[in-house]
Image (tube, helix red, strand yellow):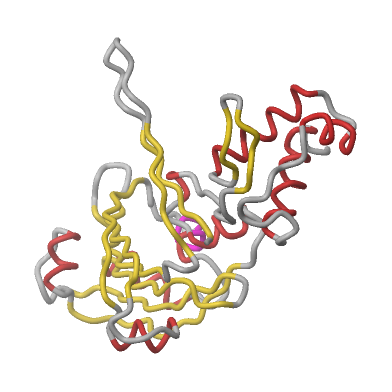
Amino acid sequence: MSSPLHVQVAEAIRARIVGGELPTGAPIPSEAQLCAQFGASRGTIRTALASLRREGLLSGGQGRPPTVRDTALGQPFEQLISFSAWVQQIGHTAGQRTVEVARRGATAAAAEALDIDEGDPVVDVLRLRLLDGQPAMLERSTFVESVGRLLFDFDPDSGSLYGYLTAAGVDLHAARHTMDAVAADETDADLLEIAVGGPLLRERRRATSSDGVPLEYADDRYRPDRVTFTIDNARPSAAGVRTDVRILKEIS
């Protein structure tokens, strides 16, 4: 079954932007031109353009003609924990190169996040994540031993750790994310192919089960020239509905 026409239109325009046919700052063809190109109504075109604005691809609106903002592609918050799922969803190729999977004693930071004692057994994973074959993120994950030991029966170069673990019945239900910036250490610099001390975007993550039991502590470091983050929020209503916050991860 084919996708709705507005989805097809958005995909076609997105492909032009990502492929460079519509560079940053370029105007999008007029609604009339797009209607003719796609055999679509103005309502369909407007729906497609609105979805691209929400992704952060287009600027404009409220009477201003849309232009290409940049080549950023957004990721909804609920998928932030899966790099592979995000990259596949936006039509790019995810890859990974595993540096280490090891059982060892928990560091002080991991122990605090996982509510265990420092030195308790955990499983550490260090992987270089690739976006279209290029280094994009260095992933450091520490799993509680009962979860991490499942990874010794999995080839971590084959795909998503989260996909494998959830398929194995692990209840990876929720996560808290903390964003900041750090300077690249020697390992970061070597694997991400940047200079020591170069700026990186860091996402620290604490993943829990549905009943709140900590399962993973992660320290993921992104090259800011390839991936950025955007936070969209909205003012709460007069009735006191809480502010809705979405975190978008983007390709630069």
Which corner quadrant of the image does residue 232 belong to? top left
Let me know if residue 8 is in the magenta part: no
The one nearer the camera, 112 or 148, is: 112
Q: Is residue 234 above or below residue 161?
A: above
The one nearer the camera, 65 or 13, is: 65
Residue at image point 71% right, 54% down: 22
Residue at the far top in the pictured view? 239
The tally of labels here is 0
Residue 177 image point, x, y percent: 30, 52
Residue at image point 88% right, 38% down: 37
Which SS does the magenta portion mostly show?
helix
Residue 237 image point, x, y percent: 33, 15
Q: Which residue range is magenta in the image? A: 163-167
Residue at image point 38% right, 44% down: 231
The quadrant in which the N terminus is found is: top right
Q: Is residue 21 above or below residue 104?
A: above
Residue at image point 52% right, 76% down: 96
